[in-house]
Image: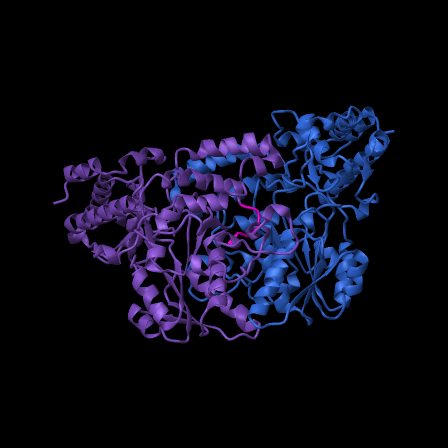
Chain colours: A purple, B blue
Amino acid sequence: MHTLEACRDLDRRDPLAALADRFARAASGRIHFDANSMGAMPVSAPERIRRLMTECWRDKSRRAWTSEGWVERPRQLGADISHMIGAGPGDVVVCDNTTVNLFKVIAHAWKLRAGGDVILTESHNFPTDLHVAQGFVRLLNDLGVDARVRTAQTRERLLDRLDRDVAILYLSHTDYRSSERWDLAEMNERARAAGALTVWDLSHSAGALDVDLAGAGADFAVGCGYKYLCGGPGGPAFLYVDPAHQGGAWPAISGWMGHAKWDRFLTEYEPDPGTARHLTGTPPVIANEVFAAAAEIWREVRREDVAGKHESLTETLIALLDEECGALGVGINSPRRYPHRGGHVSFSHPGAGPVSEALVDHGLLCSFRAPSSIRLAMSPLYHRHEDVWQAVRIIKDVLAREAWRDPKYQVVSI
Amino acid sequence: MHTLEACRDLDRRDPLAALADRFARAASGRIHFDANSMGAMPVSAPERIRRLMTECWRDKSRRAWTSEGWVERPRQLGADISHMIGAGPGDVVVCDNTTVNLFKVIAHAWKLRAGGDVILTESHNFPTDLHVAQGFVRLLNDLGVDARVRTAQTRERLLDRLDRDVAILYLSHTDYRSSERWDLAEMNERARAAGALTVWDLSHSAGALDVDLAGAGADFAVGCGYKYLCGGPGGPAFLYVDPAHQGGAWPAISGWMGHAKWDRFLTEYEPDPGTARHLTGTPPVIANEVFAAAAEIWREVRREDVAGKHESLTETLIALLDEECGALGVGINSPRRYPHRGGHVSFSHPGAGPVSEALVDHGLLCSFRAPSSIRLAMSPLYHRHEDVWQAVRIIKDVLAREAWRDPKYQVVSI
């Protein structure tokens, strides 16, 4: 039995417990289990931004470019979060958005591929991941170069289709709907055996799971900065390149910030020797300052503590959903074994759309995915086991009283 | 004679005079003539950001994606500034940075080119403009496709080299050092005659000059959002595509935000019918909110008023520099005829490096470019003719007293 007292006991033994106070809580008191969509705001962020806007933008203007280290920030932020994905501090940069970064690493991988003309991925990968691959292939085809996207509907079929024609194995580590998780090391090994390079999207993993890119032998990875990483709405994404590949090719988007000597204003492009060659133009100063508020916290934590707490929170959630809501129509969509599960937990209910609206109204922010699933995503940095207990109480109450049948909940927002 | 009284008289007749109060002034009281590097902060920006961070990020979390219209912002901001560059409201988007946008429009132009394999530009174009072209050509060459960057050191040579091999004529409208301005309509016409498409970088023009992309027959354009446009340090850039070309090719970077039905989460990419196909990933919400503070002001002004005031400010500056500082070693680097001059005014002095440092210390923020020039860039939105008069007084004082020879000014920041 997962009692309230048992949850509180887990919280008392949580090595990350003190971090919760460094994140702002909603004025409504609502529990926000949407870390897969937007991580919470570090308490220090508003004051950082106020200072940046007045003391830097208003008062120093262009002189802040150098005095504030704005140009070094993309490298610094990459180093700050690097341990969370098992990367060396110089192997990650924070820049642009996930889509643009996916394009960069696909182009980089394509240039280094051993052979083949196929980008292999899942047919239900996240839309932008699919679009980027489709657009890259179309670019090549428009240039008269052979290239294809090959998709597979199931994991079994994907393994079947990982043959010598595959240049790039292109996967989301965690599925954005079901939360199924790939085994990083196994898939890198299978790709290598087939002569393919791997490109991973870690958007629904980084900042929650024990991701070890270098240890697992990943070639390229990118991920969202504003979900579990708490980098602020629409904040910059990250990009990783295996040290063995960093110097191997010019970046497709060659810009002055990725120049080996960016501060010299040289006319001939010379790529930075490392991952930083993938920096493009002027960094988004204000967005980076927001991200820095979170990075300051990431620097202080160990990946194993984060992943350990994430496992404990999600295992508690699933156990409580089973115990309290199983008889009320709730089924667990996500894998039950933790190593097979990603950042969030998805559960099913026939009335999922209106249920999710009713849950928000009753104090629990979650997210709905058509046709019948609800996702709950907790952050190991700022959620407690007691929050999980409270959340399940809300779910049970809404389902038991059938509160979600109220007509006002029938219009569902995405 | 340009007396203080004459300057004040011009200010009294300035139709944009009231806008100055909508921009924050440096606490130091220093005059910031660096609008070519970082436009001033709209007074409304800090409160907009405070609200966004607390009421939206903290309190609404993921629900703000839909309730706040964050996803429509890149289109809205593009429409808000479109009249300032002579574009239709649906023909411009605000997104990513200038470098990434340059890559997108070069790739788009390449797909539509009539023939040729040359990208023609000036050898002294801004570094990132050159780097993007070099990187794009390298990408094509790595794919086995013929492509070359061809450069010219002078404008005359560039015209000579604009032949049938040229696929894309790729120019900065205003030179970032000298402030020389190309004639948009003439160069579009010359390119068309040679069978080439044009790609313009308007970074040192937009928000200051009377740029009329559609009227001048430009094919593609991009530009910086944080210089004269005041979109905030490192804020997003803009991107324009001639309506005739918008539907002609898939974007190289195909992302979910550029999908014709982005909110449907479809797996097959289908480009937006217009310029918005060049949107990539999740928009930078906080940066866009800052930009919106400036866009609100741009919506209220007429391009001819902005350009008229810009001409008046810069003509006054040159006349005063001649009158007051000509005998003190100051020469004008920029074209003297307004239609040939871009956003800023560059002047030369043998001690330009230390002079620029001394000017900052004496109340005038300008920028130095090695070896011997200083750039002054005024914004028609918030600078007055009286500021110009004061600035020249400071320059005259620093030069006449040789204050810049103080050893503390010998270390020059870029």
Residue A93 in the image: state x and y as whole percent.
46, 50
Residue A78 in the image: state x and y as whole percent.
44, 47
When the figure is inspected, residue A395 is found, relative to residue A106, above or below; the finding is above
| Residue A279 covered by magenta stretch | yes
Residue B117 in the image: state x and y as whole percent.
67, 70
The residue positioned farthest toward the right in the image shown = B1
Q: What secondary structure characterizes most of the magenta part?
A: loop
The residue positioned farthest toward the front in the image shown = B407
Q: Quadrant of the N terminus of chain B?
A: top right
Is residue A77 left or right of A364 when viewed as pictured?
Answer: right
When the figure is inspected, residue B340 is found, relative to residue A136, above or below; the finding is above
Q: Nearer the viewer, residue A106 or B40?
A: A106
Is residue B19 left or right of A301 when viewed as pictured?
Answer: right
Q: Quadrant of residue B408?
A: top right
| Residue B5 covered by magenta stretch | no
Is residue A381 something one can see in this rendering? yes
Q: Quadrant of residue A233?
A: top left
Residue at 43%, 43% in the rendered image: A232
Q: Nearer the viewer, residue A407 or A161?
A: A161
What residue range appears in magenta? A278-283
Q: Nearer the viewer, residue B83 or B154?
A: B154
Q: Nearer the viewer, residue B412 or B160?
A: B412
Is residue A130 left or right of B395 when viewed as pictured?
Answer: left
When the figure is inspected, residue A85 is found, relative to residue A162, above or below; the finding is above
Is residue A349 something one can see in this rendering? no
Residue B382 in the image: state x and y as whole percent.
68, 33
